Image (cartoon, coloured by chain):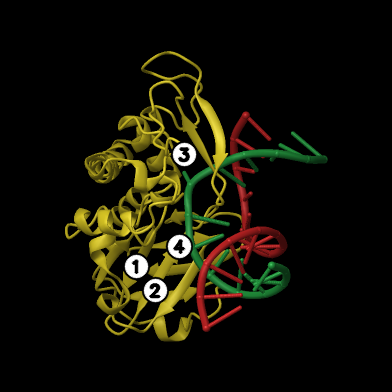
Chain colours: A yellow, B green, C red
DNA sequence: GGTTATGTTATTTC
DNA sequence: AGAAATAACATAAC
């Protein structure tokens, strides 16, 4: 359930807990001082990339849903509770996720300008970081959370299709202007994805992710695990240009 | 029943 | 030391 926009959506679903005090904190996640959390007022909620942050006056609780994470708002699921926070006006329960207790100030921990959905996102810096590894596959560069925090495999596949770039292209072979538009598209699609989540229509908009046919040329899409991370790439061999050296 | 999947981190190996 | 490969984790859907 991850990817940045989904976490922003989750934050919105939980916004009524801001200002409330934790009545009970429970779960099996190690490293959470449950007793200490109880009685604390939730002062803010933030996201960073695929992470959700519960901000208390002197600490933060960070949730990462990883691949199989689940949550339930004002209800429970029939599985091992990783972390549950009960407030006067409701509760939220997290399962199969990673939770961390953070004492360090967030501004020290996070560079908000690399989060594609953050107001302070700096596309120029993302471009500069990307170009530092010219031999890297573009499909892997897009998933690098230190370059584009919040971008996941769905967004990756969709932006490559939209900008008509083959996932196996090398960063250093793609014209810089194309890289720029690709980064812009990550931002644009992330906000669209957030809107789709709000409307509950996010599953209706994927053009290539888990699809069989190219919407442009009606030819079959390819599905391959590319790169050392071996994440699934869905792409059209015909309309997505492969940028590699001539002697490759 | 095996495979796959919106992802990251710890451990092992080179 | 540090990069790179591998394992681990946990759950639902096909």
Q: Residue tagged by mark 4?
A: A64
- First-in-chain label (4 vs 1): 1
Q: Nearer the viewer, residue A188 or A230?
A: A230
Chain letter belonging to callout 2: A
Closer to the N terminus: mark 3 or mark 2?
2
**Disc 4 crowd, CA 10 A, few/some/many (<14, 14-19, 20+):** many
Q: Are marks 4 and 1 in contact (CB under 8 Å)?
A: no
Marked residue nearer the N-terminal end (2 or 1) = 1
Which residue is nearer to you in this view: A67 or A248?
A248
Badges 2 and 1, same chain:
yes
The relative height of residue A94 versus residue A246 in the rendered view (above or below) is below
In this rendering, position of residue A159 left or right of residue A245: left
Q: Which residue is mark 2?
A: A61
CB within 8 Å, label 2 to label 1 = yes
Of labels 3 and 4, earlier in sequence is 4
Task: Give the spatial CA distance, label 2 vs label 1.
Answer: 6 Å
Determine whether the residue tagged by mark 2 lies in a helix, strand or loop.
Answer: strand
Q: Secondary structure at mark 3?
A: loop
Provide the chain ID for the residue under circle 4.
Answer: A
Q: Nearer the viewer, mark 3 or mark 2?
A: 3
Q: What residue does disc 1 label?
A: A53
């Amino acid at each position: 359930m991850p990817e940045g926009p989904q976490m922003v959506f989750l934050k919105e679903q939980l916004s009524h807990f801001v200002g409330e005090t934790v009545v009970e904190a429970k779960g099996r996640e190690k490293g959470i001082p449950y007793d200490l959390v109880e009685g604390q007022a939730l002062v803010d909620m933030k996201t960073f990339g695929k992470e959700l942050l519960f901000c208390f006056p002197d600490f933060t609780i960070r949730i990462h849903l990883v691949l199989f994470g689940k949550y339930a708002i004002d209800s429970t699921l029939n599985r091992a509770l990783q972390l549950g926070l009960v407030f006067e006006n409701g509760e939220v329960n997290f399962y199969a996720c990673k939770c961390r207790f953070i004492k360090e100030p967030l501004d020290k921990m996070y560079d908000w300008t690399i989060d594609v959905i953050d107001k302070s996102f700096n596309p120029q810096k993302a471009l500069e970081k990307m170009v530092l590894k010219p031999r890297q596959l573009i499909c892997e560069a897009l998933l690098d959370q230190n370059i584009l925090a919040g971008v996941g495999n769905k967004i990756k596949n969709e932006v490559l299709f939209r900008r008509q770039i083959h996932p196996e292209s090398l960063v250093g072979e793609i014209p810089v202007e194309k890289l720029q538009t690709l980064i812009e598209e990550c931002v644009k699609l992330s906000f669209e994805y957030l809107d789709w989540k709000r409307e509950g229509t996010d599953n209706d908009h994927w053009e290539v992710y888990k699809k069989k046919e190219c919407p442009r040329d009606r030819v079959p899409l390819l599905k391959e695990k590319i790169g050392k991370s071996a994440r699934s790439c869905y792409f059209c061999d015909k309309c997505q240009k492969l940028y590699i050296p001539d002697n490759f």
